[in-house]
Image (tube, rainbow, N blue to C red):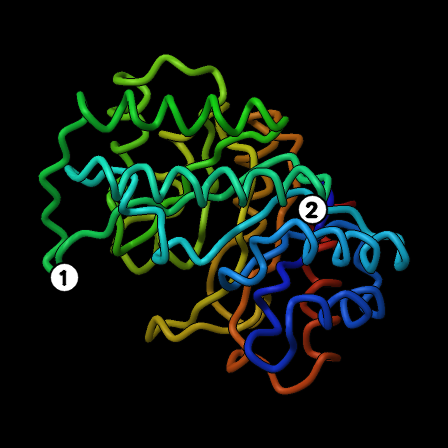
Amino acid sequence: MEVGISTASFYPEALTEETIPLISELGVKQIEVFLSGYSEYQMQFCKALRSEIDRYGLTVYSVHALGTQFEPQVFSPSQRQRKDSQDIFLKVFKCAQILGAKAYVFHGSAVHLNRKANIDFKRAGPISDELANLAADHGIKFSWENVSWCWFFFPEFADRILENTKSENLFFTLDIKQAMQTGRSTFDFLEHMGERLINIHAIDFKDDKSLTLPGRGIFDFRRLHRELETLNYKGPLFMEVYRSNYGNYNDLGQSLDYLRGIFSS
């Protein structure tokens, strides 16, 4: 399994394009690109970014976007809002295609702070099919990520959305931090994602649930490795941390080495 890193791990210290040489210095070859705003959903920007990525010999596996800007609106009761959202999705999928990405990471709609979601799966399913099929038209896998403040805050969501969709292009991204913040085990989410899992976001946390670099907390990465082997998982694992979780880039390198020692051996 290849261990990579998300460009989001350098935000806001470095702009998206500025992360590429920094990542190269860490010895990483595969990355997830976080497009952080409307100006980055443009073909010209992504072509320039692709040139920089190629120059440093990196490859892009997945693309994330600042989904709060446009993702929830795709489920809006307003036809105009849905159309605007779909237009942005089209731009982002085109950019992902330019970058050579294989997957798009999707958050979707938010829930209330008490995590009560009145989800109309019969309506959400066909809309999800449309997005998944649009992604497929651009050679991109549509991957729904578990997020503590969005619809996918409970493991069983994976089963419910699959029951109400027909697309073969709907997959899942497992996020360790987001699972912890729901109060449910990462392994509960993993069980329900099953063979539809194509991407993983790795971070660690301490007893008090504060976040830290992988290898410096209490999360059982070795168990995760065993569980993934049982699933015959062949995808990558990306370290996705916050800038406040480390002191300098050497810390990132040490954590990447820790993950490689478990997942790449």
Dot 1 or dot 2: first in sequence order is 1
Residue wearing tag 2: 263
Q: Position of residue 184 (x, y in %)?
A: 28, 49
The three-letter code of the residue at mark 2 reads Phe
Above or below, 184 against 40 in this view is above
Q: In this image, 225 relative to 44: left or right?
A: left
Q: Quadrant of residue 157?
A: top left
Assign a secondary structure to mark 1. loop
The three-letter code of the residue at mark 1 reads Leu
- Report the quarter where the C terminus lies: top right
Q: For this rendering, which residue is in front, 85 or 206?
A: 85
Marks 1 and 2 sit apart, C-alpha to C-alpha, by: 35 Å
Of all residues shown, which one is farthest toward the top?
A: 166
Around disc 2, counting alpha carbons within 10 Å, would you say few (fewer than 14), some (14 to 19), or many (20 or more)?
A: many
Q: Which residue is found at the position 82% from the left and 69% from the top?
A: 21
Q: Mark 1 or 2, which is nearer the eye?
A: 1
Q: For this rendering, which residue is in front, 114 or 59?
A: 59
Q: Residues at badges 1 and 2 in contact (C-beta under 8 Å)?
A: no
Q: In this image, 199 relative to 194: left or right?
A: right
Residue wearing tag 1: 113
Q: For this rendering, which residue is in front, 104 or 87?
A: 87
Q: Position of residue 112 (x, y in %)?
A: 13, 56
Q: Position of residue 41 (x, y in %)?
A: 56, 53
Q: In this image, 242 relative to 122: left or right?
A: right
Q: Position of residue 192 (x, y in %)?
A: 36, 29
